Image: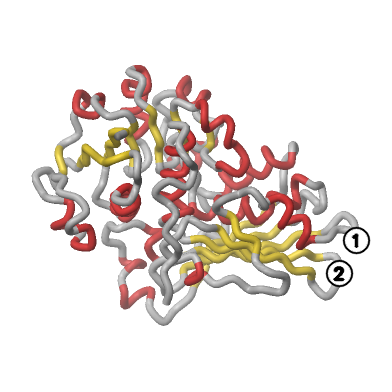
Amino acid sequence: MIKVGIVGGTGYTGAELLRLFAQHPQAEVTLLTSRKEAGTRADAMFPHLRGYTDLEFSAPDPEALAACDAVFFATPHGTAMAMAPALVERGIKVIDLSADFRLRDTATFKQWYKLDHATPALLSEAVYGLPEVHREAIRQARIVGNPGCYPTSVQLGLLPLLEAGAIERDGIVADCKSGVSGAGRELKLGSMFTEAYDSFKAYGAAGHRHLPEIRQGLADIAGAEVGLTFVPHLLPLIRGIHSTIYARLTRDDVDLQALYASRYADEPFVDVAPAGDHPETRGVRGGNTCRIAVHLAPDRRTVIVLSVIDNLVKGASGQAVQNFNLMFGLDERAGLQAPPLAP
């Protein structure tokens, strides 16, 4: 079995990693760290994992982490870049769920995350972990920067159109909504039940830190800069992201449904919905699927893409396990084949 360590396992993404690896046929979590919760059993903090793990949290220890084959960082921004270099140097594969290894430009990283990057050399070799774009590079990677949730939904929504040159590269609008778990497990006023329930609001309209990540990814796909307006919203639900994306077609002979069906035909975790469908967040809850529907507006020039994911699975921990599978030459679907939950 491949030995897995999780640094910072007390949050939602850490708990999701534990849940997913509980059903992984070729890997097991052998180390779970938290300074604050050292000595606490994971199933005491997460009762839904009773019977699936007997691990206790322990304080991060470099030698203990070095005994793992792979280490996941489910930590605040800034932690992974401080600890990852020593692990990579010892041959341990690293998957970081924070933003430390997503943005290639250190000045952009500092602008949005208010941190100097601690290891520019390792950043330069890190692979951005969107398998549908960088699959072969991920297979060879020593360190992967796992994409953010909004960026995953938006990039997968636009990928076929940009690759085909079927839309204008400027004036794209991504109108995105997320459940409250996207804010993390720590106590925040805006995430409280009485604050979020029975309400709906936009935030970060003047600039959100996922914007440069989305723009970077779209530029990689298009081969040129892409003009994007991105506005996130908070929904009064626990899990899920729904992105409604608008773009202008460059020609009128594009069979949109065929374009998406062809591009994603061999992708295990992208489901192109039937023509005319409107995917729902509950249709992907608990699963590693991105479900996409594509529509043509009445003006016959505007394409509307609907892209839904579970922000904690395909938007975080599920995609991280997908990257792990690629890095170790495993079946990409290992540990991720359970269907979504409904209702």
| Above or below 1: residue 264 | below
Residue 27, image x and y in percent?
32, 39
Nearer-the-camera pick, 196 or 102: 102
Circle 1: element type: loop
Residue 151, image x and y in percent?
55, 50
User: In the image as oriented, which residue stretches furthest toward the left?
Assistant: 39
Q: Are marks 2 and 1 in contact (CB under 8 Å)?
A: yes
Instruction: Identify the residue shown where x is 29% and y is 58%.
Output: 185
Image quarter where the N terminus lies is top left
Residue 293, image x and y in percent?
67, 66
User: In the image as oriented, which residue stretches furthest toward the top?
Assistant: 89
Instruction: Identify the residue shown where x is 54% and y is 72%.
Output: 280
| Above or below 308: residue 328 | above
The residue where tag 2 is placed is 300
Circle 2: element type: loop
Residue 178, image x and y in percent?
48, 64
The residue where tag 1 is placed is 252
Q: Earlier in the sequence, mark 2 or mark 1?
A: 1
Q: Residues within 10 Å of mark 1 (few under 14, many from 20)?
A: few
Report the colour scheme: secondary structure
Instruction: Identify the residue shown where x is 52% and y is 32%.
Output: 138
Image quarter where the C terminus lies is bottom left
Instruction: Give amino acid for label 1.
Output: Asp
Instruction: Give amino acid for label 2.
Output: Arg
Taking the image as drawn, is residue 113 in sight?
A: yes
Nearer-the-camera pick, 48 or 169: 48
Instruction: Identify the residue shown where x is 47% and y is 68%.
Output: 234
Taking the image as drawn, is residue 106 in sight?
A: no
